[in-house]
Image (tube, rainbow, N blue to C red):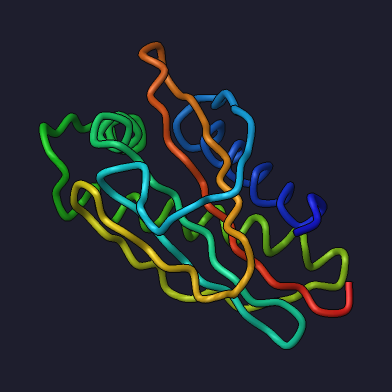
Amino acid sequence: MDVKFINPFIESLINTLEMMVGITPGREQLYIKEDKMTHGDITGIIGFAERNITGSIALSFPNDAALMIYGLMTGENVAQINREVQDSIGELANIVAGGAKSELAKSGLAFHISIPSVIVGKNHAISHKVDTPVVVIPFLIGKAKHRFVMEISMKVLGH
């Protein structure tokens, strides 16, 4: 997978967190995912497709990171993942995918995005539908350096 297709998602995530919650996440070295297990307690996943591109992204947060982001987005502090936290993680995935969509459209890669799905629970697994490697980009946020990841799986034809 070409980095020119990954960077718009990374930039969209960073811009979204800076704008919505006032945090600039630190980024760690990306790697290829070896299994279907996630790295968090809540994952927002969204698919995208069109004639020349298909794939999905997932944002996976441990409990503490999800609650921190929700609190910064809404001004509300909650003790556990609830429906509102789930909705906020799904919306975050939607905004990140939309930002990347706008950037990729400039290079001729237009696509539609699906409605986000949110999975909650320790040690859950997700399957990306595209038969390509899944790139994992770890991020760190907050003073406590909460770690979360973005997974990207994408197949681009003719580019």
Identify the residue at horizontal 38%, vertical 24% (top origin): 146
Q: Nearer the viewer, residue 120 or 74?
A: 120
- Residue 116 image point, x, y percent: 40, 67
- Residue 113 image point, x, y percent: 55, 74
Quadrant position of residue 144: top left
- Seen as rendered, the residue at the extreme left is 79
Identify the residue at horizontal 58%, vertical 74% (top origin): 130
- Residue 65 image point, x, y percent: 32, 31
- Seen as rendered, the residue at the extreme bottom is 51
Identify the residue at horizontal 64%, vertical 55% (top origin): 99
Q: Is 64 on the left or on the right of 99, as rendered?
A: left
Q: Nearer the viewer, residue 96 or 131?
A: 131
Q: Nearer the viewer, residue 40 or 11?
A: 40
- Residue 62 image point, x, y percent: 29, 36
Identify the residue at horizontal 79%, vertical 50% (top origin): 3
- Seen as rendered, the residue at the extreme top is 143
Q: Is residue 144 above or below residue 53?
A: above
Q: Is residue 124 above or below residue 50?
A: above
Q: How many marks?
A: 0
Tell me the quadrant of the picture where the N terminus can be found.
bottom right
Q: Is 67 on the left or on the right of 134, as rendered?
A: left
Q: Is residue 60 above or below residue 155?
A: above
Tell me the quadrant of the picture where the C terminus can be found.
bottom right
Q: Nearer the viewer, residue 31 or 20?
A: 31
Q: Is 137 on the left or on the right of 40, as rendered?
A: right
